Amino acid sequence: MPQSSMIEMIENDCCSHLDECETHCVDLSARDLTLFPVEGVNFSQITKLLLDHNDIESIPDSIDSFPSLQVLSMTGNRLIRLPDCIGCLTCLQELLLNENELCSLPDRISELSQLQILNLTGNCLKELPESFGDLIKLKTLHIEENKLEILPSTLGLLENLEVLELCDNTISYLPVSIGRLKSLKILNMCNNKLDSIPETVGDMLSLETIDLSGNNVELLPSHFSSSVTLKRLFLDRNRITQLPDWVAELSCIEEFTASDNKLHEQSLTEKFGMTCRMIKHLDLGGNFMSQLPDSFGHLENLEQLHLGSVIDELERRNFQNGNWIGYLPTNFCQLIKLTELHFDENQLHELPDDFGNLINLEFIDLGQNLLYELPESFGNLKSLRICQLSKNNLQLLPSSFGNLTLLEDLRMDNNLLAELPESFCQLINLKTLDVFNNRLTEIPSALKYLTKLVRLDLVDNQFNIPWDEVPQIINSSKYPDRDPTLKNNWRGRPRQDLSMNDVPIIKLEMQEVEEFELPPPSLNYSEDVLKSAAINNLSIWRSHNGNQKRERFIRKFSTMPLFGQYNRKETESEEDQDDSDYEVDGDEDEDYEPPIFVSKNRNETEDKPVEAATSGENWDDEIEDIEIPVDNPYKFQDIYVHPAPKTLAEAGYTVDSHLFLPYDMHSQPFVRQKYIYPIEDGQFDDNSDENTEET
């Protein structure tokens, strides 16, 4: 912008304000300015100058043209340095220089004797001048997202400082003088490199919020003077093994998080439940705690409780990341204000009979525990919208389960369910139902009443029914709109018409499968679309996309960690696990022998044990010669897909209706894979009826 035009614009802007109010503000934000507007204009009466989001690289020495300036905002420019004469702005109260490229501050910045708010977030500062402590009227200091390594020892002289934001730097220690900040209310030191916290932090009297998350802290100060004022304490992602006694004295605490640490056994004392009754949000997930205090039920205002895993399900793999809690305190169900409960990846064997008293519960995650049943009172949770019960040992659901009429998302995969209760048809608002890898022998007739269902997974159950008896459950379902970025594309591939008339029918005779190709694609393969689909579909359902088969959960025997051995709970990989460490389908019966699935296109050697089992022959010698890979307890083998009668085409099913999923969640729709269980030594040693029965 030409200098003359800029001056004219500024003068017009100034004139429009001089006669209107005593506070004269000039706003030149987002005007593509490259120079600081000084020359040719009288700024003696301007008190507020806004130059945000321009391309100004420097402030000239003639900044003293603003003797009355109280607010200077230059957010989002390209400032590399500040002039020494910045100290001449003796009336300046707010200086906002965030999102620039400042590498250092001049010593004369300490001459801004009236400065109350200083924002330097998003610069490249490595240190602050020692004279920084002379800004005695400073109340708010933001220096987040810089490269600070140390803080000046004079920091403690800022006796009026109320807000200190220093997150996302590389600070390794705090000066002892920080304890002199008696007026400080907010201390944010998250995502730094702190190894310890000085004891003087406990001398602060007015603290309301402390955030020390994302550091390497092992010990907290032994005393704390702000126990009556502290409302928020964040200690996530550190190395803390034990909480100090003063944590149980925080009578005003409302939010307390200490997830992903090394807390063990009963880290919360009995006093915690009696004193911290104002708490609303408590997060202790990803630790090694084995029990909760008996006074836990006295936290009458608790609304959100997180004691489960802190790792996303897609990232967990072989990690055990929850706690080790085996039971709930007897008064746990007095937490009637609880709306959100995360208790996944623990060791719960049962829920208390009065669990249904948690009538305000809207979200519950009890996945990967050891639950065999749910109490009958579970049906009283009538506010429940999301219920996750995956990876347990559930065999039955209570008859009252149908009372959860607001339920929208139900995950029960990897359990031992053989049937669903009759009341299941009352879940009319259900949109997502996951019953993957259970023991259902028939498709529940109640599903036809779930008209809002858009996601359904019944894969890996024990269905054995004629195709023409499959209930019509998908024809009324409607999948939600796709991401607009996937327009004209479907998960990175052109969307094909998978109706029954367009897909070749595979004959029932057991003969070698002839390979056939999909119709030529109408769009080219796009990695960008695949990437977009992955980013926008981060859920357990993502494993259904493409050819990858969804993995079944195999529980490994685990023991409580020994005291002092609190490393991250990564279980051994399948390569390092002995076969005895596995349970098949979560069944704890040692005599359980899984069924053997076969097909005619297997080689002759693999089929011999099966033929022997069905014909009564004894194959003791030949079975020993069969080699089963140690690193993979299951073998994958293609099998034929059953043909579908025309009546199913009219109902809208694809050929591979085993999956019962919306089209975009299908694997390749023609050939599926099933597990081939390994033959164990001695499995067919005798010709008893039990072993000769066809599986």
Image (tube, rainbow, N blue to C red):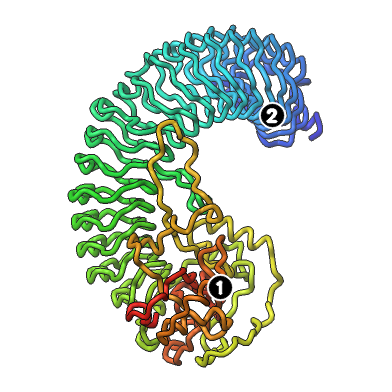
Viewer-side residue, 568 vs 375: 568
Q: Is residue 111 visible?
A: no
* Residue 305 figure quarter: top left
Establish if 528 lies above or below 338. Answer: below
Establish if 597 lies above or below 569. Answer: below
Q: Left or right of 94: which side holds 247?
A: left
Instruction: Name the residue located 32 percent from the left edge and 30 percent from the top edge.
Output: 268
Instruction: Name the residue located 50 percent from the left edge and 54 percent from the top edge.
Output: 577
Within-10-Å neighbours for mark 2: few <14, some 14–19, many 20+ = many
Q: Is residue 185 visible?
A: yes
Residue picked out by circle 1: 625
State which tag comes first along the sequence, 2 or 1.
2
Residue picked out by circle 2: 100
Q: CA distance from mark 2 to mark 1?
A: 72 Å
Looking at the rendered structure, the kind of residue marked 1 is: Asp
Q: Secondary structure at mark 1?
A: loop
Q: In x, y percent, where is residue 654?
A: 49, 82
Viewer-side residue, 687 vs 487: 687
- On-image quarter of the C terminus: bottom left
Closer to viewer: mark 2 or mark 1: 1
Instruction: Name the residue located 60 percent from the left edge and 22 percent from the top edge.
Output: 171
Instruction: Name the residue located 38 percent from the left edge and 14 percent from the top edge.
Output: 223
Viewer-side residue, 217 vs 85: 217
- Residue 642, labelled with which disc? none
